[in-house]
Amino acid sequence: MTVTEPATDQRIISYNQAFNETLRELLATDPDVFIAGEDVGRYGGVFQSFAGLNKEFGDMRVVDTPIAEQAIVGLGLGAAAMGLRPIVDLMFMDFVMVAMDQIANQAAKMKYMFGGKATVPLTITTTGGAGLGAAAQHSASLEAWLIHVPGLKLVYPSNAHDLKGLLVSCVRDDNPTIVTLHKAMLGSKGPVPEGLYEIPLGVANVVREGQDATVVAIGRMVQFAEKAAEQLADEGIDLEIIDPRSLLPFDTETVVDSARKTNRVVVVHEAVRNGGIGAEIAAQIQEEAFDYLDAPVGRVGAPFAPVPFSPTLESEYVPDADDIAAAVRATFNR
Amino acid sequence: MTVTEPATDQRIISYNQAFNETLRELLATDPDVFIAGEDVGRYGGVFQSFAGLNKEFGDMRVVDTPIAEQAIVGLGLGAAAMGLRPIVDLMFMDFVMVAMDQIANQAAKMKYMFGGKATVPLTITTTGGAGLGAAAQHSASLEAWLIHVPGLKLVYPSNAHDLKGLLVSCVRDDNPTIVTLHKAMLGSKGPVPEGLYEIPLGVANVVREGQDATVVAIGRMVQFAEKAAEQLADEGIDLEIIDPRSLLPFDTETVVDSARKTNRVVVVHEAVRNGGIGAEIAAQIQEEAFDYLDAPVGRVGAPFAPVPFSPTLESEYVPDADDIAAAVRATFNR
Amino acid sequence: MAATKKAPAKKKAAAKKASGGAKASAAQIPKEVLLDLHRRMVRIRHLEESLGRISTEGKVPGFLHLYVGEEAVASGGCAALTDEDQITSTHRGHGHLIAKGGDFRQMMAEFMGRSTGYCKGKGGSMHVSDLDLGMLGANGIVGAGVPIGVGAAFANKYRGDGKVTMAFFGDGSTNIGAWHEAVNMACALQLPIVFMCENNEYAEYTARDRVMAITDVADRAVAYGMPGVVVDGMDVVAVYEAAVEAVARARRGEGPSMIECKTYRYYDHAGVQGLGRTYRSDDEVEEWLARDPIDLFEAQLASSKVLSKAAAKKVHDEIQAEVDEAIEFAENSPWPDPTTDLLTDVYTEAN
Amino acid sequence: MAATKKAPAKKKAAAKKASGGAKASAAQIPKEVLLDLHRRMVRIRHLEESLGRISTEGKVPGFLHLYVGEEAVASGGCAALTDEDQITSTHRGHGHLIAKGGDFRQMMAEFMGRSTGYCKGKGGSMHVSDLDLGMLGANGIVGAGVPIGVGAAFANKYRGDGKVTMAFFGDGSTNIGAWHEAVNMACALQLPIVFMCENNEYAEYTARDRVMAITDVADRAVAYGMPGVVVDGMDVVAVYEAAVEAVARARRGEGPSMIECKTYRYYDHAGVQGLGRTYRSDDEVEEWLARDPIDLFEAQLASSKVLSKAAAKKVHDEIQAEVDEAIEFAENSPWPDPTTDLLTDVYTEAN
Ligand SMILES: Cc1ncc(C[n+]2csc(CCOP(=O)(O)OP(=O)(O)O)c2C)c(N)n1
Ligand SMILES: Cc1ncc(C[n+]2csc(CCOP(=O)(O)OP(=O)(O)O)c2C)c(N)n1
Ligand SMILES: [Mg+2]
Ligand SMILES: [Mg+2]
């Protein structure tokens, strides 16, 4: 585990800017790195996350592709197997579904199927999550599918600082990695050091130390957990918040240590609860900290329905600070 | 829950024959039912599961399609939305990956996205699991992905009798359903009544009643759990075995009742443990039976690697009776 | 042996050039059909323009892909269909639903996320649908509507009900796998379907020539063994005539055909913030705006004495009033109630 | 306006007919190339026949898709490549690997699941690969090798290393989405790649004409804006000449092209149980067997005094001995050890 010290460099930029500048620095420092995806080139990406990169590095390093997610991932996989270090973009995490074979059946398995002789330094970037009224096909949270695939690595940064460090680690990793940005966080600002730095994959971050209960929160849920911590503090509950940052590999040790300390845990994610990554985390906690738990590991996630369009439904659908606080309270009132 | 009584009808046929005769009877009794997939027509399917059906019902009711899984599922979805009751075959569960968008983004969500105005009585059949030396791309176990998708239903029959009853229920269900056969069980025989009968979705089967520990086993793992029960009986451990049969919806109540009775539970599936359906089941058990558990809910599944080709590796990879027995013992020795 | 060459098909005369010619054929089309074509286009134009306007007032959640500029395609295509035929659509689906007879009130209410909308506010712009009209839904996934359309066409053939399906899709969608699989399957099974391509030369913000090495999407018809034609997508009569022929062919059981309509979207890929001039040249935009499908057709209708300018204006005013009324209806409609509506409609309950 | 028609391309003279003609061109090909083509074919034939035989003895786990009958395609194609060029393959990949220079011992060991195999026994027949030879793997998923090949070709263009990639695939795979996406992307990006179609008229047990409404897969080249040719896939010289031209074109930076080879697999889709006569007529099978690519070529080599029957037999005997030795090597090789091998090679560890 690591505990975030107040960032020494106080430069404040947005999550989306952090993504863009990191890509620029990676392109500038490693000639084997290139980017490919829909609208990422001339236009700079639908969220302008790739703005200026094509102009600076040209059409072969920041490549506009047809609408063809299977071929986009295949382009990255084939190039990675040849020793390049591709970054391919899938725009929305929902589109993982059309590219799933190339991701989970090809890229993830190539090394093992080939007896270790292949190396696949491929990075896939995408944007997940709800909150923009984008409805059922543009709001996906598919972390649970991806952690079930041996050969992949998956990160879900919850702030601009981590986004940069995790993205650098993924691009430099020699395995297929997936970096999920949350589309509702693109504008959120935070301190981000200049230059390239790595945040090791598989190392969780203790966002807030506390004694009474632990919340393991993923991606955008981290900021809601922090709000919940304030509410609960008034009630005398001192919350510890853990942001795994990397979901595969997963830092079980940091989470279990916290569970053994606080004896109460709630896992929070945006995906639907059933079959969500919270199930895996809860299962691991009860396996490793069974004798320390004073209550069942709680799980907060979306209810079992597709993401609805209307704001009144969507805002109820997406877990928030109140849901988290309620789940924590429930671990005390039994 | 239901407890299987000794089948009154003692006719013994294979799992694959049960599948074939059920399809024949469904085609014969419901003019809205048709089958489409690769090689399912003239040839009768790669495992001859569809043998004779095209000859008997013709090219429009048992349809040979191009190699185009997205279009195969789309064919079924569009026809189902128009009021037909299609059965589309995906041959190997691995191919779910190439059709994932049509399954999880289109078929599963259509009703909700359309405000309830669509009805999608679509059934997808496929064969999952390892054991035939088919290696990493023809041995998939993807139940965990599918239970994470609101709108779908999923069954995994562990014997010929259940296969028939579950298949009938799925085809008659007005929602998108997925019936997973285990390819290593196609030849396994058992008693199967004549005529069509339904096994309700979401109702588990207590395969063996016991007092000391509970094993929740899925698909092919049920027979291994029964072997483990014999081993453990000699050691004085009276095992209860639950076959959920339907994974979505899932019969939590039957499983939790058993956990409260035996106080020890092990969940067994063939897919890799991490992010597997065992995580969801374990999480639910500790939520609902926390105060009754004398040990953490154990999980048995494949190790975190793709399915290997070589028999020596594959046989070690796939969970077996010894693995199950060991996990049960572990719930006693802590 | 000498290998048998397969040279790429000759590029056809650019549709825009071709469209310069007089529309002789329009003469043979009954007056009421011409007026119907006009009406459908105007209905699309007014709803979309008004929707775009209120979206700038923050009244429309989510993404908004407007059909303005492409009215002739949906109108000419759907006018060749009966109410019983089906269509499938795209992320840019409002025009298709309107042309198929969509109800303004339920559309506006849906786009604004109200419980009185077509999808009770659960779908929004990208999933608006009306199964009673045979409109099988807008679709958020590029290309994904086409396999669904093939399934609908299969149902038509299966039942022998004489209905046909028309699948609308954009030029960019023809590069994705689902589109290819579905088109090939329809041709292999000889299904009653018409593949209607809206080639507006862009996929989001990327020009067609950067993502495919052909100019005419219709060249792809050859790959599946079906006829393909290129028509001027700003000429509603040209679209209508091609659609009538393709639909008749499908009804005769002769299988699928493809129609490529050269058209243009006026606004940016999404929303109404500008005309996308960062990636489209002013000249290009002006050239297309100068060939507005409604203006062109109204000039033609006036000169052929089918519809005077004054009468045309009356149509516009009527329809605008209907749009305004629909917006008012939507604004006064209740929001969906999370406590009762969030978890319904996920599954069909057994009865 | 009159719509611009796009009639399906004329069907080309059936390759088999065309192949009747004398192989004048063979004359211009250097003797060592002709002998090399012959040797590659014979290597494939002997390994596959022996592999089929031992598979009936239960020595080969899993599925087995043999290349017998199609030797001219892999041999003619790979002979046009250098050792540095790449190929991608399919579920029927043994011939491709052998033609690219694959090692018999490591192949046999892999097929028999031994730790001395190309993939340490972890991949088997459907995943056999040799990255050092630029063979990027057989593939268990139809069509999935083609996007990977496009990625390899992109790397070639990115580095400007002058290498090209040849993607092999079957007729049936051209109906799946991944194939379409990859081919279009390669044409849009003008990558140095050759698309090599093995049209053996069947996808598993289903005839081509039941799943596509065209006769020549090469007709699909038009849809992407690249040249496509049909060649006699039983004529190794015809395949070689077409491949040389396409490879040269790719190296010149002129982009992709497609070669359709009309060929036939002798055995059933999988294994050696029969010749698949339940779904293929005796006449059809006989007609193809009568045009065996090795027999045809050896007759030609004998008549042109390049290789006598006796010399040819010597080649066969040498190669069979090598195959037998490889089988013996494999049978004496250790099995992978679960305790040490099962969980390695999942990830590349940081160094
Ligand atoms: C599978 C998938 N990939 C990417 C997108 C994002 N996207 C939405 S619309 C669009 C462009 C579609 O272009 P075209 O088919 O020409 O339709 P147009 O917008 O021009 O009408 C893209 C890339 C998507 N919705 N689905
Ligand atoms: C996506 C996918 N669908 C189906 C299959 C099953 N399958 C394996 S080979 C094959 C036929 C392939 O036909 P073709 O491309 O013509 O190659 P051939 O076997 O004739 O060499 C099929 C359907 C598969 N492996 N992958
Ligand atoms: Mg377009
Ligand atoms: Mg074939």
Image (cartoon, coloured by chain):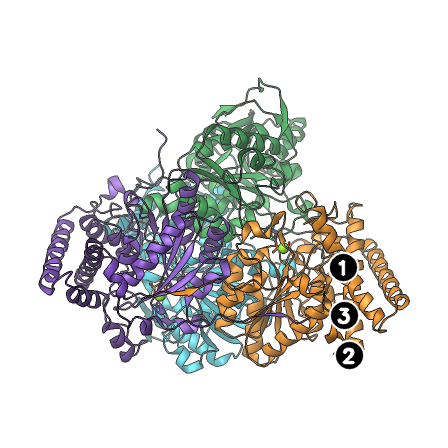
Chain colours: A green, B cyan, C orange, D purple
Which image quarter: residue B191? Answer: bottom left
Q: Residue at x 53, y 56 (%)?
A: C176
Query: Closer to the observer: label 2 or label 3?
Result: 2
Q: Which residue is mark 2?
A: C30
Q: Disc 1 on helix, strand or loop?
A: loop
Callout 3 crowding tier (Cα within 10 Å): few <14, some 14–19, many ≥20: many
Label 1 near ligand 1 (CB < 8 Å): no
Label 1 sits on what residue type? Asp
Q: Residue furthest top?
A: A8
Residue hosting label 1: C292
Asked if the residues shown at circle 2 and circle 3 are in contact, with their CB atoms under 8 angstroms apart, the answer is no
Q: Assess disc 1: are there few (<14), some (14-19) or many (≥20) residues with their C-alpha within 10 Å of its C-alpha.
A: many
- Label located before the other in sequence (2 or 3): 2
Task: Find disc 3 in the rendering and name its residue.
Answer: C37
Q: Nearer the viewer, mark 1 or mark 3?
A: 1
Q: Position of residue C38 (x, y in %)?
A: 79, 68
Q: In terms of depth relative to the viewer, which is nearer, C139 or C99?
A: C99
**Few, some or many residues within 10 Å of mark 2 (<14, 14–19, 20+):** few
User: Mark 2, chain letter?
Assistant: C
Which quadrant of the structure image shows residue D265? bottom left
Residue B129 in the image: x percent, y percent? Answer: 36, 56
Q: Residue at x 49, y 63 (%)?
A: C181
Same chain under badges 1 and 3? The reply is: yes
Q: From mark 2 to mark 3, how far is it between C-alphas? A: 11 Å
* Label 2 near ligand 1 (CB < 8 Å): no
Is label 1 on the same chain as label 2? yes
In space, the residues marked 1 and 3 are separated at their CA atoms by: 14 Å
Q: Residue D236 has which mark?
A: none
Q: Is residue A156 above or below residue D194?
A: above
